[in-house]
Image (spheres, rainbow, N blue to C red):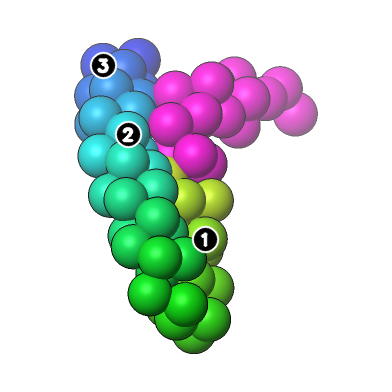
Amino acid sequence: MSGSQNLLGYAGSYIGGVWAVAGALWLVMCIRNEDNEGRNKALLCVVCGALLLSFSKIIPLFMNAKK
């Protein structure tokens, strides 16, 4: 079980990093072009990327919970 936990953590971190950087670049372009709808979508991508970056810390909280 810990192998899959590590795999999900590493995959989430790498995917989240790419997603957050892409969202940040998209945000800069939307601010430059004064695109409000695109800015909101870009902010959502940045937030989702940040959450995925912390995925490796979140997974153990739920996997190791004792009943």
Q: Which residue is mark 3?
A: 3
The first of marks 3 and 2 along the sequence is: 3
Q: Main secondary structure of the magenta part?
A: helix
At horizontal 40% and vertical 55% (from top left) the residue drawn is 28
Q: Position of residue 23 (x, y in %)?
A: 36, 54
At horizontal 54% and vertical 73% (from top left) the residue drawn is 40
Quote the CA–CA distance across marks 3 and 1.
32 Å
Q: Quadrant of residue 49?
A: top left
In the displayed structure, 45 sits above or below 5; it is: below
Whether 62 is among the magenta residues is: yes
> Which secondary structure lies at badge 2?
helix
Which of these two is toward me, 23 or 54? 23
Disc 3 to disc 2: CB gap under 8 Å: no
Number of marks present in the image shown? 3
Disc 2 to disc 1: CB gap under 8 Å: no
Classed neighbour count for the residue bearing mark 3: other residues with Cα under 10 Å, few (<14), some (14–19), many (≥20): few
Quote the CA–CA distance across marks 2 and 1.
14 Å
At horizontal 39% and vertical 48% (from top left) the residue drawn is 24
Q: Which residue is mark 1?
A: 43
First to last magenta residue range:
50-67
Q: Which quadrant would the N terminus be assigned to in this image?
A: top left
The amino acid beneath tag 3 is Gly
- Picture disc at residue 17: 2
> Which secondary structure lies at badge 3?
helix
Classed neighbour count for the residue bearing mark 2: other residues with Cα under 10 Å, few (<14), some (14–19), many (≥20): many
The amino acid beneath tag 2 is Gly
In the displayed structure, 32 sits above or below 5; it is: below
The amino acid beneath tag 1 is Leu
